[in-house]
Image: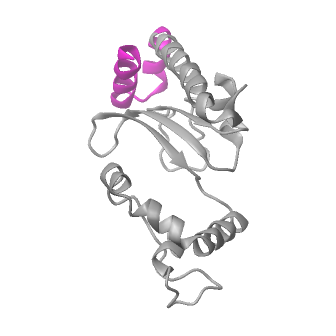
C-alpha cells in the first residue's frame, strides 16, 4: 500500500496532465497494488455477503480520470482510488460497501476507509427507506443507539433536510430520522 499512498499524495500536489504522463509507471504500480487489495476485499466481503461473490475488480472500481465538462474544478484526475461492492458492482443503485483511499481534502492527511450504505438514492428508494424506519422503529433505534455504533460512528447522522419530507407530519415522532438526507 506504500505505493498507493505515495502516488496519490504526489498526485494531490501535482494534479495536471504533464505530471501524470511523466509518472504513468508509478500510477500503474499503485493501481495494480490497489486492484490486488480490492480483489482480496471482494473475497473477504463474499465470505459473509454472498451477493458480491463473482464480482471482478473491474466491476467495482472507478477510473481515475475526472469528467470536467460541467465542473468548475478542471483538475483532470481524482486524487483517490475507490471501489463499490454490491451485486452489480459500482453501477448499482442499492446499498452496499464502499472503499476509499486518498488524501483528505480538508486535513491533507491520507485516509482510507471501508463504508456501508446507500449513496444518492432516488425518490422512490427514499420513500421505501423512510417507511421502513417508521415501520421498524424499535429495531432502528436499537441499532442507532447501540454504544458500539455511537463509538465507531460519532455524529453518523450527517446532513438533514431543513423540513420534514413531503407527505409526513412535521410533528412525526421519528421526524429526526425522516429528514436525514
In this rendering, the answer to whether 134 lies above or below 144 is: below
The answer to whether one can see residue 78 in this image is yes
In this rendering, the answer to whether 41 lies above or below 148 is above
Q: Is residue 59 left or right of residue 96?
A: right
Question: Residue shown at 36%/52% (left/top)?
Answer: 153
Q: Which residues are magenta?
A: 1-25
Q: Position of residue 96 (x, y in %)?
A: 60, 44
**Viewer-proximal residue among 24 and 47:** 47
Residue 104 on image: x %, y %: 34, 40
Q: Nearer the viewer, residue 60 or 29?
A: 60
Residue plotted at (70% across, 36% down): 51
Residue 144: x and y, percent?
A: 43, 62
Magenta residue check for 21 = yes
Location of residue 68 by image quarter? top right
What residue lies at 47% left-to-right and 20% top-to-bottom? 20
Residue 58 is situated, as x and y percent measured from the top left of the image, at 67, 24
- Number of numbered discs present? 0
Judge from the rendering whether residue 169 lies leftward or rightward of residue 10; answer left or right. Answer: right
Instruction: Indicate whether 181 appears above or below 2.
Output: below
Q: Quadrant of the N terminus?
A: top left
Q: What secondary structure do most residues of the magenta stretch adopt?
A: helix
Amino acid at each position: 500500500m506504500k505505493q498507493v499512498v505515495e502516488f496519490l499524495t504526489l498526485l494531490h500536489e501535482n494534479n495536471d496532465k504533464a505530471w501524470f504522463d511523466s509518472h504513468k509507471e508509478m500510477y500503474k504500480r499503485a493501481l495494480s497494488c490497489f486492484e490486488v487489495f480490492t480483489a482480496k476485499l471482494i473475497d473477504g466481503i463474499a465470505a459473509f455477503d454472498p451477493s458480491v461473490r463473482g464480482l471482478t475488480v473491474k466491476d467495482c472500481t472507478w477510473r481515475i480520470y475526472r469528467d470536467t465538462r460541467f465542473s468548475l474544478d478542471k483538475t483532470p484526475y481524482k486524487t483517490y482510488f475507490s471501489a463499490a461492492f454490491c451485486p452489480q458492482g459500482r453501477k448499482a443503485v442499492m446499498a452496499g460497501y464502499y472503499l476509499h483511499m486518498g488524501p483528505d481534502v480538508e486535513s491533507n492527511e491520507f485516509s482510507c476507509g471501508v463504508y456501508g450504505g446507500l449513496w444518492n438514492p432516488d425518490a422512490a428508494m427514499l420513500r421505501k427507506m423512510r417507511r421502513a424506519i417508521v415501520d421498524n422503529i424499535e429495531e432502528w433505534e436499537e441499532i442507532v443507539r447501540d454504544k458500539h455504533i455511537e463509538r465507531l460512528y460519532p455524529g453518523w447522522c450527517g446532513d438533514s433536510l431543513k423540513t420534514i419530507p413531503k407527505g409526513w407530519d412535521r410533528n412525526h415522532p421519528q421526524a429526526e430520522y425522516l429528514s436525514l438526507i
